[in-house]
Image (cartoon, rainbow, N blue to C red):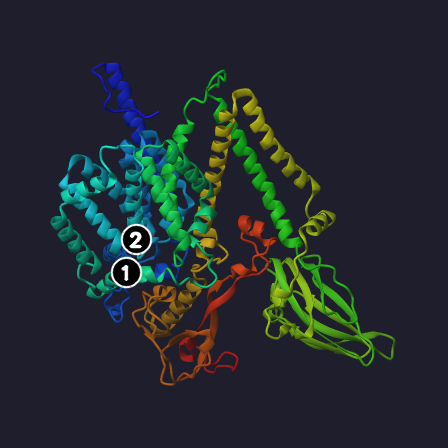
Amino acid sequence: MDISLDAITSNPKTNARALLRISLESALYIAIFTFGLILRVVQLDAVSLNGVEAHEALAALHRVQPHMTENPAIANNPLMALINQFLFFVITDNNFTARIATAIVGALLILTPYLWRERLGRVAALVMSLFICISPVALVASRTMGGVIWTMFFAMITVWAFDHAHQKQDKGLAILVSACVGIMLFLTEPTGAFTVVGLVFGALFALWTRHDTRNTWLSTVGQVTRAWPWRDALLLTLGIILVVGTGLFASPNSLTFVGSTFYRLLSGFVSRPDDLPAAFALVVALRYDLGLVLFGLLGMYFALVEGDQFSRFLAGWLFFSVIVSVIYQNSTPDAALWIVIPAAGLAARLTTQMLRDPSIGYWEVPRWAIPVHAFITASLLVSIAINTTRISHVLYLEARPFGYHFLTNPLHSAEISSLDDNISQNVYQIDTASNVTVSFVAQIWRYQGDIEPIMRVVVEEPQANGEVQEVLVAGPYTYDELKDGVAISLRGSNRYLIKVSRSVDQSNARGQYAFITHPPNAIEGNSLFNYRLDAPFFWTLVRSLSNQNLPPLTLMITVFLLMLLLISYFLAGSIWGSRTAWRGVGFGFLIYFLIYGMGLGWQASTVYANDPRELWYNAEPAPQHLNTIIQTLEDMSIQAHGIRNAIEITVLGKNDTPLAWALRNFPNAVYVNSIGGDTNTEAVIVPYAQRNTNLSGDYVGQDFALSQMWHWSTLSWADFPSWLMLRETSTDPIDTERVMLWIRKDVYGVQEVIPTQSN
């Protein structure tokens, strides 16, 4: 399949065909690069910077903004900080310029397999370029300032430069290898050493498993180390580390990060962020790039059995990366590239092998057989995925507590109910006996839609004229209270009605909720959602069908499609042989996973970027409501000073957070560690927990939720399919960071502050 460009003869027709091949190959690389660049750049600034991104952006901005020189942030990626420092100085500082450098490096990473053509093969290198282009892990890492993207870019260059330096005894390329290794170790991200060790492990593994009996792998290593230009390489590498690490000497303190790189690396073996899955990098790789990883592992098998030296190098690199991703506890989501990049190379090799003529023995296979079978397989998989999405959504809604009973003592009961244009209120009846007190905890949990129900408890009291009057005995309770559970006590022989309705300001809201009751002690020392019971799978399925939420036809079609998938495989095998059938199935699955993965990557980097249920952002989701805070401050600044950014702001918090990045253009913003009665600035921002801090003057305030979290431990079997497809779970994310924005009354434009608004 590979075409040697050296095999050009003096025949004009041969020359023309060879040049045509050259231009076609170049055109394909340009097309793939352009497509990848578009994916990485379009709507790059649509999502706010999360905590990791804001820290890196502010580390660069602190070097060029005169009013930000106090306690500057230290970059975790000094090379990215240097380039952003230049972009902020020459262009401007915003979300787009903060991310564009990493996005361009991610696009350039697509072209790096071109350097491997001699070792990997021309077709395999082109296929690897395509895999990196549409890999969701590479896409999201490129759009979120992922440090590992930079490391992998230099890793690809290192492999090419080392190979040529060893073959041609080129001193300049050897120095380039040393410089790239130094950059990966100290200037891209704290875990760059894993990539360096992975490359070394892969090279040693390839040498150890080669069949050359004349030279042992130890003798080869000795030859390379003796011929290496150590002095020149070390001098250049140290110079690059010094210049880049200090940001062209604009931030000498940044060298402290370079010195602590290995300490931070080693500490990651024993510390892991709360509630993140173990082997996080491996989980991310399987979640987003499952098809590529599986093909890579299959390619690793063939590399060990019948592969050449370069394939075994990739196999060793992938093996090491998988081991590290399992044992390293503090990996970031972009660390999945440790696995994805070598897997892409092995998958590309395997793909080119599958493109060979499958005809063997008496099996004559036409050229169109494998493409047609692959297309049929991919189409069936897409149809199965669509129907599975519908089924998973229904199971997510139906696998809930059910069977509400009108009990005298309603301690364990639940009902799924709706509020929409036709149903504005639901009533739950409880009859109590005389001399009996019924106590329980009531909870309401939203499952679908945007409703925030309120609840009132009334008692029916007969009147002298024979009518029945409803008297309020408890409530109304807000949705925020009902999510946590409220204690209810009902006394005497009466008929009580629990009424659930939409709030006044939600007259157009629609959705489903569960009304659940618990024993009276459930609220003490327990998280109430742990009391919710998941129905067994069989009864959930039966109930879904009986409620007609899951049409039987959908389930039947899904089963039928699965049968067609098996039938197509056996039919292709009976006509053209098992080799053709397996290749058709393999290409079909690969096409499906690549298409699905590309959509998954785009959704992760845009649609679900601020949802902690998105695996990539579980630890660091993009913040919310920052634009509203900034717009409020700009309006108040115009009202008080006539310009947008002149308002004086005191912020209780650090200067390297997403909020600090949002406030970067307010030169009068001051960050403090404590606030007291002497604080009298025009605006004050404090954590919500400290909202009652005494300030010098009257202020009008509003709270804003900045970030949320979601616990993996709450994911049940019923939620898993819907989470996988739609990021729907029965437990909503909870606010983890709220801030209170106080505006001084004279700036806000009021003479007197009512108690509910004042500080």
Q: How far is the residue under mark 2 from the one under mark 1? A: 9 Å
Q: Is residue 453 visible?
A: no
- Image coordinates of residue 313 in percent, x first then y, are 32, 39
Local secondary structure at mark 1: helix
- Image coordinates of residue 329 in percent, x first then y, are 40, 58
Disc 2 marks which residue?
A: 192
Disc 1 marks which residue?
A: 261
Q: Which amino acid does label 1 sit on?
A: Thr
Q: Residues within 10 Å of mark 2 (few under 14, many from 20)?
A: many
Count of numbered circles in the view: 2
**Rendered image: mark on residue 417:** none
Q: Which of marks 2 and 1 is nearer the N terminus?
A: 2
**From the viewer's perspective, is residue 512 above or below residue 561?**
below
User: At 77% across and 64% down in the image, what residue appears?
Assistant: 405
Q: What residue type is labelled 2?
A: Gly
Asked whether 5 or 342 is in front, the reply is 342
Which of the 4 quarters of the picture holds residue 658?
bottom left
- Image coordinates of residue 553 in percent, x first then y, are 69, 39
The answer to whether 87 appears left or right of 403 in the picture is: left
| Quadrant (top left/top right/bottom left/bottom right) for the N terminus | top left
The answer to whether 472 appears left or right of 358 in the picture is: right
**From the viewer's perspective, is residue 582 above or below residue 238?**
above
| Discs 2, 1 touching: Cβ within 8 Å | yes
**From the viewer's perspective, is residue 579 above or below residue 592?**
above
Which of the 4 quarters of the picture holds residue 227?
top left
